[in-house]
Image (cartoon, helix red, strand yellow):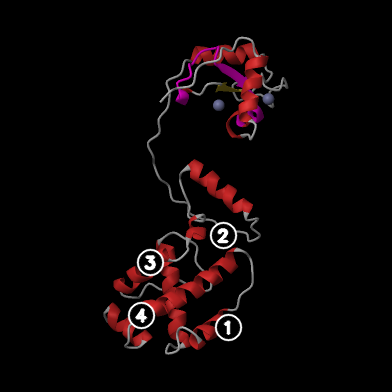
Amino acid sequence: MSESTQESLVLGSRDWTDEEFNGAIQAYLNMLRAELNGEPYNKAEINRQLRAGPLPTRSKGSIEFRMRNISAALYELRMPWIAGYLPANNIGSTAKEKIVDLLRANDIAFLELYVPTADRQELDNKASALRKQAPEVRPIGSFQPIMVSKITTSYVRDPAVKAWVLQAAGGKCEGCDTAAPFIASDGFPYLEVHHVMPLSSHGSDTTTNAVALCPNCHRRCHSSIDRDEFKLSLYQKISRLIVEAPAMD
Ligand SMILES: [Zn+2]
Ligand SMILES: [Zn+2]
């Protein structure tokens, strides 16, 4: 049986109009939004409202099937879908493309936040944005995360500079003066070497631009709300450091 024959058997002979698709899509997105926010909603009641409203000639089962088509389209877009509507893929490719187009024409920006990413910065940005929404729903996550390979760039660094900076710190963080948090597998106190002017900003790999920090102070340099002030405090505190001009590119 061809896809289109199957579709017409399930859905009746008349094709769905854009208005009908949109009615279903908008109802679906409202339910999905509620689900993501942990708010209750009633699928049967919404199906009834659709038949009383924008979909007067469609059956309960036909609407249900379209909801599952919408799940299938969202699944393809790697966006979240309503667990109660298992993706149904047995629709014609034209209908599927139409659903994807109409979904994109609707306000689905809130779903972009949930699309998994291999980009660390994008992951952090999305997680921050989601935390601001104070989520209460515990996500399912992924039991088989997709592996991607990517091209990374690195700087060739001088091991003698790293060794010297770590040795000079004498087992204490140069940022907060507390002892290294543990002994590393090489037997030395664990500290991390950070370039105060980043190598990516054309900073030098020299002892006058590198500091030995505990993991907390190191993260503070990269991720803290006060990272600029903290950087200034390092220049003031550690006399061997020389301020370098940032790259002008
Ligand atoms: Zn520290
Ligand atoms: Zn660093």
Q: Is ligand 2 less than 8 Å from the beta carbon at label 2?
A: no
Residue 21 position within the rendered picture, expressed as x and y whole percent measured from the top left: 40, 76
Q: Quadrant of residue 226?
A: top right
Ligand 1 quadrant in view:
top right
Side of 62 relative to 124 (left or right): left
Q: Are marks 1 and 2 in contact (CB under 8 Å)?
A: no
The label nearer to you, 1 versus 2, is: 1
Q: Residues within 10 Å of mark 3 (few under 14, many from 20)?
A: some
Local secondary structure at mark 3: helix
Q: CA distance from mark 3 to mark 4?
A: 14 Å
Q: Sequence order check: which comes first, mark 3 or mark 2? A: 3
Whichever of callouts 4 and 2 sits on the residue coming sooner in the sequence is 4
Q: Amino acid at mark 1?
A: Glu
Mark closest to the chain's N terminus, 1 or 4: 4
The residue wearing badge 3 is 100
Which SS class for mark 2? Answer: loop
Residue on which disc 4 sits? 17
> How far is the residue under mark 1 from the one under mark 2?
26 Å
| Residue 233 at x, y percent in the picture | 66, 20
Please give left or right for residue 11 compared with residue 123 in the image. left
Tell whether position 212 is magenta: yes
The residue at the point 65 percent across, 27 percent down is 217
Label 1 sits on residue: 45
The residue singled out by tag 2 in the image is 140
